[in-house]
Image (tube, rainbow, N blue to C red):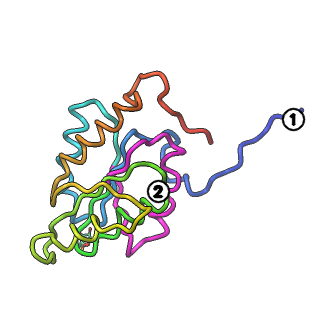
Amino acid sequence: MPEETPLPLPVLEDYDEVGPLVGIIIGSDSDREAVEPAGIELDERGISWELRVLSAHRDPRAVAEYASTAALRGTRVLIAGAGMAAALPGVVAAYTDLPVIGVPLTSSKSVMGGLDALLSIVQMPPGVPVACVSVNGARNAAILAAKILAQGGGYPGTPGRPTAEL
Ligand code: RP5
């Protein structure tokens, strides 16, 4: 029998084949500083992570590709931070079965210090849940991600850590 060649998955071209345990997505470069505490917290816990800037409004196709392939790469939890009409966590949740933690962020154009983003993230319709931490609560998002990972024995080196099957 001829050796089977895996089918190419063009959407994965930009990403490492095996992803980190946690994927952090933000809607804009201007959100970077606000989610830094999440990266610091995950580093301190020895949990692998990556950060992507992908806007639900400006580049919805890239968001769909990233979210729909994250589990395939072995990622176990997604954190999505955005400000203003923060559709990002909800759109990510629409494309994956992974748990999604939304972080409402304050931006220079926020209404009431981020209330706009808080409501956009927390008011998901029934059937598409997004966990929501406080406004600018990136550190809590990382701690929650760690707790979710601990339930499945998903820390690096733990037997059962999923690997990508491409
Ligand atoms: C949201 O709009 C982003 O998450 C950001 O918080 C906000 C403003 O984005 P920029 O205009 O700074 O790119 O989509």
**Residue located beneath label 1 in the image:** 2
- Please name the amino acid that badge 2 sits on: Ala
Query: Ligand 1 shows up in which quadrant of the image?
Result: bottom left
Exactly how many numbered labels are in the figure? Answer: 2
Q: Is residue 75 left or right of residue 164?
A: left
Residue 99 among those drawn in magenta: no
Residue at the extreme front of the image, as rendered = 126
- Please name the amino acid that badge 1 sits on: Pro
Q: Nearer the viewer, mark 1 or mark 2?
A: 2
Residue 21 is situated, as x and y percent measured from the top left of the image, at 39, 39
Q: Nearer the viewer, residue 86 or 126?
A: 126
Residue 79, above or below 3? below
Residue at the extreme right of the image, as rendered = 1
Q: Quadrant of residue 60?
A: bottom left
Residue 151, above or below 87? above
Q: Quadrant of residue 133?
A: bottom left
Residue at x 26%, y 57% (from the top left corner): 132
Residue 63 among those drawn in magenta: yes
Residue 4 is situated, as x and y percent measured from the top left of the image, at 79, 38
**Residue located beneath label 2 in the image:** 67
Residue at x 38%, y 64% (from the top left corner): 90
At numbered mark 1, what does the secondary structure look like: helix, strand or loop? loop
Q: What quarter of the picture does the N terminus occupy?
A: top right
Q: What quarter of the picture does the C terminus occupy?
A: top right
Crowd around label 1: few <14 · some 14–19 · many ≥20 (10 Å): few
Task: Give me the C-alpha separation between circle 1 and circle 2.
Answer: 33 Å
Mark 1 or mark 2: whose residue is earlier in sequence: 1
Q: Nearer the viewer, residue 67 or 11?
A: 67
At numbered mark 2, what does the secondary structure look like: helix, strand or loop? helix
What span is in magenta? 51-79
Residue 34, above or below 48? below
